Amino acid sequence: MQPTILRLPVVKSESGLSRSTIYLRITQGLWTKPISLGARAVGWPAHEVASLNAARIAGKSNEEIKNLVIKLEAARKTLA
């Protein structure tokens, strides 16, 4: 499966969250940090957005989602 990077408009559409809510959740540790695509562009791996949406749908607690965020961001370092 080819890794896909989603830009903010798609992330907003798929999550149902506003830009400000996404960035608020990043500061709260409830959403993964974006990856840099260039000087003025960022995006999120599609599988991370899907995992976070699935966790919310499953009714996971904020603590469980924070742990998921930590695991997802740590997994980025193993990709090469």
Image: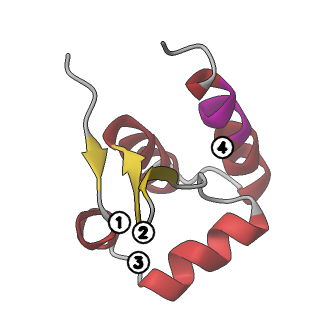
User: Residue 74 sits in which quadrant?
Assistant: top right
Q: Residue 44, image x and y in percent? A: 41, 50
What residue would you read off at disc 2?
Answer: 40
Nearest to N terminus: mark 2 or mark 3: 3
User: Residue 40 sits in which quadrant?
Assistant: bottom left
Q: Are marks 1 and 2 in contact (CB under 8 Å)?
A: no
Mark 3: amino acid: Leu
Cα separation, mark 2 vs mark 3, equals: 21 Å
**Badge 1: how crowded within 10 Å, few (<14), some, or many (20+)?**
some
Mark 4: amino acid: Val
Nearest to N terminus: mark 1 or mark 4: 1
**Badge 2: how crowded within 10 Å, few (<14), some, or many (20+)?**
few
Nearest to N terminus: mark 1 or mark 2: 1
Residue 27 in the figure: left or right of residue 24: right
Q: Which of the two discs, 2 and 4, sits closer to the camera?
A: 2
Mark 2: amino acid: Arg
What residue would you read off at disc 4?
Answer: 69
Q: Which of the two discs, 2 and 3, sits closer to the camera?
A: 2
What residue would you read off at disc 3?
Answer: 17
Residue 72 in the figure: left or right of residue 47: right
Task: Kindly give the residue lying farthest to the front in the view shown.
Answer: 39
